[in-house]
Image (tube, helix red, strand yellow):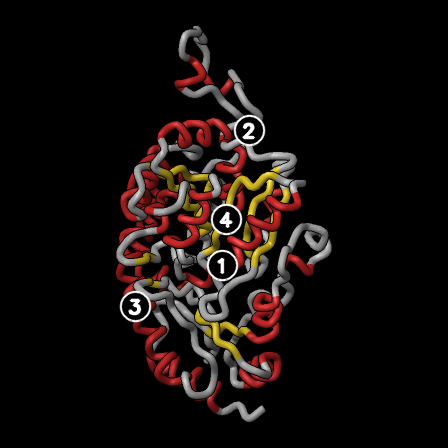
């Protein structure tokens, strides 16, 4: 029997009647772009994530770009972010003309190291070439970063804070979601994410109504919004009055309809993921380095990532046992050609070490105990 790394089919079987009905409803009304389900989903997503507003968009990458654009971040600015992350995190920074500044991560959670962040900000200020403007903290593998400390540092230095929750939406710290500390929280609905659609999609959560309006303009080609029309008359569709340079980044109505049904069971899936993670920890903690979760934190376990001295040998062994694995991220961003020239004050030794050691095992809310026992036995059976 083939073991699925992420079993999307199992979730689909659970939700098939609801999703089929939701799709048929959209097909019936025909509002395929920015239809009523989009607004409904945004409201539900904001409530789930403890935010005042949510703004959906085409993908999780655009979700990070939209607030940077709305804040006017650009040439001469520095945006601090980890290197041990997917390309989407630093990729959006050069879009604006700004530069990513790479900061190392913690050895236990792989999330942004607050002490290294403080040092990096000081180094960039001392150099004087770039102006620190923002921090992007990543909720890697499903758990929240140390937002109380990161937010305090960001506020003290006058920096905006983005919680990149592409892998971690639904995770919390002391019962609070990242938006409690961050200026915005962003997420991705790529199918493999804990809350994923059947294509691309993303969202930005914020408590700032004015920021939401600007991002709403930016996601639709810089269309005029209410504040742009104050004191002036424009009798046509506001999308034909373009008040800023924007992009085309809308969530399809069909995807919003699907996500409404998935969000309805998301809390129960997060609970199920806790059971799977606990079973892994119990079965593997004496043979590999199992994940640590920040004190007071709840992870949504986008991945279950362990460390092993012979990561590649273990992966090859597990493949012979029918167990799929993945290595996140074998080449940190600061070692990739397009990013190698950007600042990395103090170096990134933890990121570089983790890149050679981490390996992710199958993880999803529907992983049955007997299948997981096979995976655990296969890991324990490696003698390399």
Q: Which residue is mark 4?
A: 136
Q: Is residue 242 at all visible to an observer of this figure?
A: yes
In the drawing, what numbered circle is on residue 272?
3
Marks 4/3: CA–CA distance:
29 Å
Viewer-proximal residue, 37 or 288? 288
Viewer-proximal residue, 238 or 356? 356
Q: Label 1 neighbourhood size at 10 Å, few (<14), some (14-19), many (20+)?
A: some
Q: Nearer the viewer, mark 4 or mark 2?
A: 4
Q: Which residue is mark 2?
A: 246
Q: Nearer the viewer, mark 2 or mark 3?
A: 2
In the drawing, what numbered circle is on residue 115?
1
Marks 1/2: CA–CA distance:
36 Å
| Mark 1 / mark 2, whichever is N-terminal | 1
Residue lying at 54% horizontally and 39% vertically, measured from the top left: 133
Residue lying at 52% horizontally and 19% vertically, measured from the top left: 243
Say what secondary structure mark 3 lies in. helix
Q: Is there a contact, CB below 8 Å, between mark 1 and mark 2?
A: no
Image position of 91 with respect to 371: above or below: above
Say what secondary structure mark 4 lies in. strand
Viewer-proximal residue, 69 or 327? 69
Q: Nearer the viewer, mark 4 or mark 3?
A: 4
Marks 4/2: CA–CA distance:
21 Å
Q: Is there a contact, CB below 8 Å, between mark 3 and mark 1?
A: no
Considering the image in quadrants, where does the C terminus appear? bottom right
Residue 367: horizontal and vertical position, in percent? 37, 73
Image position of 62 with respect to 239: above or below: below
| Mark 3 / mark 1, whichever is N-terminal | 1
Image position of 142 with respect to 108: above or below: above
């Amino acid at each position: 029997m083939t073991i699925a790394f992420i079993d999307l089919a199992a979730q689909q079987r659970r939700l098939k009647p609801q999703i089929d009905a939701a799709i048929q409803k959209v097909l019936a009304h025909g509002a395929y772009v920015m239809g009523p389900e989009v607004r409904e989903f945004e409201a539900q997503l904001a409530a789930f994530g403890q935010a005042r507003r949510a703004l959906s968009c085409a993908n999780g990458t655009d979700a990070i770009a939209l607030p940077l654009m709305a804040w006017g971040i650009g040439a001469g600015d520095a945006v601090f972010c980890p290197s041990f992350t997917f390309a989407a995190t630093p990729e959006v920074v050069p879009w604006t003309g700004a530069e990513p500044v790479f900061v190392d991560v913690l050895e236990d959670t792989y999330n942004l190291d607050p002490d290294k962040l403080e040092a990096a900000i000081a180094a960039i200020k001392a150099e004087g070439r770039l102006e620190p403007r923002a921090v992007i903290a990543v909720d890697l593998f499903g758990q929240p970063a140390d937002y109380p400390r990161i937010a305090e540092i960001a506020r003290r230095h006058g920096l905006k804070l983005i919680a990149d929750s592409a892998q971690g939406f639904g995770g919390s710290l002391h019962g609070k979601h990242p938006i409690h500390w961050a200026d915005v929280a962003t997420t991705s609905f790529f199918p493999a994410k804990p809350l994923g659609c059947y294509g691309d999609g993303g969202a930005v959560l914020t408590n700032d109504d004015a920021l939401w309006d600007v991002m709403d303009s930016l996601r639709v080609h810089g269309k005029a919004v209410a504040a742009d029309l104050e004191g002036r008359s424009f009798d046509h569709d506001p999308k034909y009055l373009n008040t800023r340079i924007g992009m085309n980044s809308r969530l399809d109505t069909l995807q919003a309809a699907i996500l409404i049904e998935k969000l309805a069971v998301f809390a129960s899936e997060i609970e199920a993921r806790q059971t799977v993670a606990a079973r892994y920890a119990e079965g593997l903690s004496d043979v590999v380095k199992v994940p640590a979760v920040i004190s007071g934190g709840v992870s949504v376990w986008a991945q279950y990532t362990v460390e092993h001295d012979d990561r590649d040998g273990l992966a090859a062994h597990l493949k012979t046992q029918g167990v799929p694995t993945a290595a996140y991220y074998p080449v940190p961003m600061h070692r990739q050609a397009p990013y190698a020239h950007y600042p990395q004050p103090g170096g990134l030794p933890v990121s570089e070490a983790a890149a050679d050691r981490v390996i992710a095992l199958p993880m999803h809310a529907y992983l049955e105990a007997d299948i997981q026992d096979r995976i655990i036995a296969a890991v324990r059976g490696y003698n390399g």
